[in-house]
Amino acid sequence: MITKLKYYLLISCLAGSLFQKVNAQVINYETIVTVADNGEKTTEIYVLIQINSKDNNSASHVELSHDHNEKFSVNYARILDKEGNIIRKLKKKDLNTRSSISNYTFYQDDVITEFDLYWNQYPYRIEYSYTIKEKEYLFLAWWTPLVIKNATTIKSSLEVNLPSDFRFKFTNPDNIDFVESQENNRIKLRWKALMVNYPKEEIFSPAMEQLIPVVKVIPNEFTYGISGNTDSWSSFGLWLDKLNYGTDELTPKEKATIENLTNGISNKNDIIKTLYYYLQDKTKYVNVSIDIGGLKSYPASYVCENKYGDCKALTTYMKAMLKSLGIESFYTIVNAGETITEIDTNLPGQQFDHVILMIPLKNDTIWLENTASALPYNYLGTFTQNRYALAINGVNSRLVKTPELTANDVLLERFYDFHLTDNDKTEVNLDIVLRGDSFEEFRYYVHENEEKKQKLEISQHLGIKNLTDYHWDITDFHRDSTFLHLIVNGSSSSVLRKLGTFQVINPLRIELPDFEDPDERKSDVIINLPISKYDKSIYKLKNTWQKEVQIPEGIKIENEYGSYSANFLNKNNELIVIEKFTLLANKFTIDNYKSFYEFIKTINTYKKKNAILIK
């Protein structure tokens, strides 16, 4: 047991030992959450940061996120020298409050209060404190000891102070000290951590919330618009259903429009598709954060009149259109992003940031992403595939799993036709079929007529250095296609190289992810989405019957991680190379990483040593 005196001496020693290091450090980070007897929640936060060099000055810019429903105040903010003397105090006029605008929307409901505490003599410290008061809330604390990316937090603590009859549930990370006590008819929960480092970012690592310690404290009963509880996913879904009750009604004018639009269509799937097209063509997505901006949806009538809305409003609008024609659908909340943040299924409550629509049919389930005007019908894509979501249906609300994309769903196909000449130039005809995230990106750029971004996206998939004077066309395009077919034409001087008396072709073009060496890797591997690539290259040569052509031996590898193969054929003045690579969706611990790395290393070694030689 560390005494209080020894504890603070230890902190001073640790801070001193890090004093000259390059990275900024969070010397102290304290959070105190207090729930008053009347239920009002107050969160007080104190932060002390040390900046050791000009390379750390980004840490002197502070952004504090909150929203209009909270009573927010900055208690103080100041600069200290290394002896602890106050150099400068922040004035009220130095605070700037703004909406948080993302790159893809014209309005967002997050609010940022920001300020700068820059000094030019190192090391120096910045110290600030702020308070947030809330009458309505869904959680008591969602806390991690880490404050600044890539900075060590030397000392941190969370205290949650509650009335003795307050019902709650919480998670308790193994690597944080925890003490629970009762005094003066109050419950006090306290977590304390020393020397917590920000994890190094690694390829295909778990979501950050799975890598860092996180304390979650949730009330069993709450009021957020209306009263609810977190006893089960069913009860939480019932609360959300009641919160949004009555929002799925169209205006009379819109209802008449929908009836005219679907008149004469008998197939239910065709009706849903027609309405989805209408949603995509007539509305605009406006991003309002689901967790900070509130969970109650704007009514469908709002979208009818304004033709825009956030994910909640657009999903409610689509649900209302279907409801007006007697088709049942379920408002479904989900955590979005290509990196899947796992839902704690044992902790019912608000863990989601996006809304989609689930429509059960007799022999199928339709899933609609209502914010994406560029994506095909019944396509969730990489953003929400293969994860838990909560389908809202009153007391029958339940966790469901969204569809999982397969290797074929994300297959990148490239078909090369090389015309090798006697000069240094090679004419290149290339067919590319995009699927998965590259398909989603390119569809958006096509929809928005962003030609420069289209070209940049194509350049990442050419597989050819120095392709010049190239142009592209999109073929076989349909709004419901789950792929994009591109035809690219150009020329290159790097396909055929001279090496002494030989001409050399390096034909294996599939790039593999750049995984860390086993000695460097720290985290488990989570591949949420398969990687699947197929290349076929045809090299048309002149007079190969007069030349000696040496082709490598093929290879085929297949195991629990995926597969790789390469095959070569010399036939009728044509060299044909077929290369395939698949990395399966997978999860495995760091203990299995060495075996996995050997699979990747074997492929890379083979690719580097194999070339076609023409003499």
Image (tube, helix red, strand yellow):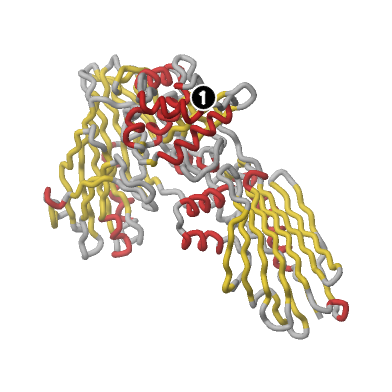
Q: With 125 as the anchor, is 266 left or right in this view?
A: right
Residue at image mark 1: 399
Q: Number of marks in the image? A: 1
What residue is rendered at 22% in x and 24% in y?
A: 40
- Residue 367's quadrant in the figure? top right
Front-most of 117 and 157?
117
Reply above or below: 502 against 69.
Answer: below
Rendering coords of residue 163 (x, y %): 26, 18
Residue 369 visible in the current orientation: yes
Check disc 1 and give the amino acid type.
Leu
Rendering coords of residue 165 (x, y %): 29, 14
What residue is rendered at 46% in x and 25% in y?
A: 259
- Residue 112's quadrant in the figure? top left
Rendering coords of residue 61 (x, y %): 26, 54
What residue is rendered at 44% in x and 30% in y?
A: 318
Residue 9 visible in the current orientation: no
Reply above or below: 292 against 50.
Answer: above
Reply above or below: 524 against 332.
Answer: below
Q: Secondary structure at mark 1?
A: strand
The crowding category of the residue bearing disc 1, from other C-alpha atoms within 10 Å (few below 14, some 14 to 19, many at least 20), is many
What residue is rendered at 34% in x and 21% in y?
A: 243
Q: Report the quarter where the C terminus lies.
A: bottom right
Rendering coords of residue 569 (x, y %): 83, 64
Front-most of 195 and 267?
267
Front-most of 414 and 59?
414
Q: With 133 as the anchor, is 274 left or right in this view?
A: right
Residue sticking out furthest to the right: 545
